[in-house]
Amino acid sequence: MHDHEHDHRQDNAHASIADTHGDSHYEKRATAIIALLIEKGLVTADEVRRAIEQMDERTPALGAKVVARAWVDPAFKARLLTDAKSACTEVGVDAGTLAHIVALENTDTVHNVVVCTLCSCYPRSILGLPPDWYKSLSYRSRVVKAPRDVLHEFGLDLPLDVEVRVYDSTADMRYLVIPARPPGTKNLSETELATLVTRDSMIGVAKARTPEQ
Amino acid sequence: MSAKFKPGDNVRIRVGSPPGHFRTPSYVQGKVGRVEAIHGEFRNPETLAYGKDGLPKQILYLVSLDQTQLWKSYTASLRDRLFIDIYEHWLEPIE
């Protein structure tokens, strides 16, 4: 591929972007199954590519839009807490046919944080893909048992009179945390408010950003 | 839909390790909790996982547990609770 001579430093640079690790057993198995499904005509390569593309199109910005509307419109928030999927459609967020979304409100007295101890269930249709730490054994095993320690590691310490509720999504429900609206945001527009709503605040390991942060 | 339990009921989560797939983690098995809500009826994941239709649908409950009762070493706060989704056939009544 290279028709010129180059020295050691460039070799190291190339090595850092070379694919040297090889696929794991499960990556090889997944690749083989996909190839087999395509070979047997059950799916096309383009359908696989499109499904991945659609997953990647979902981002936390969708959830942030929902939260910002809940912050400015109490009646919307009430509808969101009763039937999250329907409420999401009001702000143009389509949670999809498979998802059962439940919204959880963080207040002065209750702080919710979400996990899936069994695997990595997560409201992907409105937040996109979960972060790697969410899928780690460390998070999944420790947040149910020592939530305040885990939150502390994320930089969040809560008073003892706040009830910490850990939601373990073991079944069909996918939980979306509505973080508390930060102080000093009365004059912000709904669009500006949405920029304060982070992915981590909708999982419950952080509060929403303040305008200063 | 005839639910066996209603919000406010105290329930015990059954102990079991049936062959195949099930979604009741061992850390809550044998523990006592309180029904918070009824999510509705859903196909049984224990049979869905093996290509069956998951029928009849099972009633799914939101159950909360006191963290200080759930874990021997939980001292952080008396108010903290664990909320978990459990299917009806994994719950037993308590007086």
Image (cartoon, coloured by chain):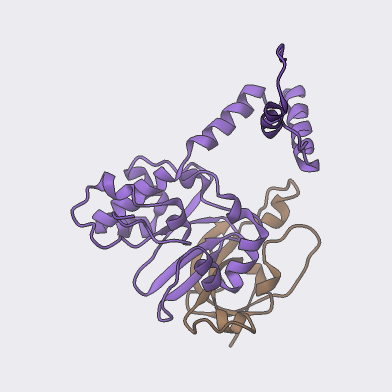
Chain colours: A purple, B brown
Any part of residue A102 in sight: no
The quadrant holding residue A20 is top right
Look at the picture and state if B44 lies above or below A97: below
Would you say B14 lies left or right of A184 here?
right
Any part of residue B71 in sight: yes
Q: Residue at x 40, y 61 (%)?
A: A207
Would you say A85 lies left or right of B9 here?
left
Tell which residue pokes out farthest to the top in this image: A3
Look at the picture and state if A113 lies above or below A45: below
**Which one is nearer the viewer's eye here, A17 or A48?**
A17
Q: Position of residue A80 (x, y in %)?
A: 36, 55
**Which one is nearer the viewer's eye here, A133 or A10?**
A10
**Which one is nearer the viewer's eye here, A192 or A21?**
A21
Q: Quadrant of the C terminus of chain B?
A: bottom right
Q: Residue at x 23, y 57 (%)?
A: A185
Tell which residue pokes out farthest to the front in this image: A7
Q: Residue at x 78, y 65 (%)?
A: B18
Would you say B25 lies left or right of B17 here?
left
Tell me how many marks there are. 0
Q: Position of residue A8 (x, y in %)?
A: 72, 28
Tell which residue pokes out farthest to the bottom in this image: B95
Q: Position of residue B16 (x, y in %)?
A: 75, 71
Tell which residue pokes out farthest to the left in this image: A187
Would you say A91 lies left or right of A26 here?
left
**Which one is nearer the viewer's eye here, A120 or B42?**
A120
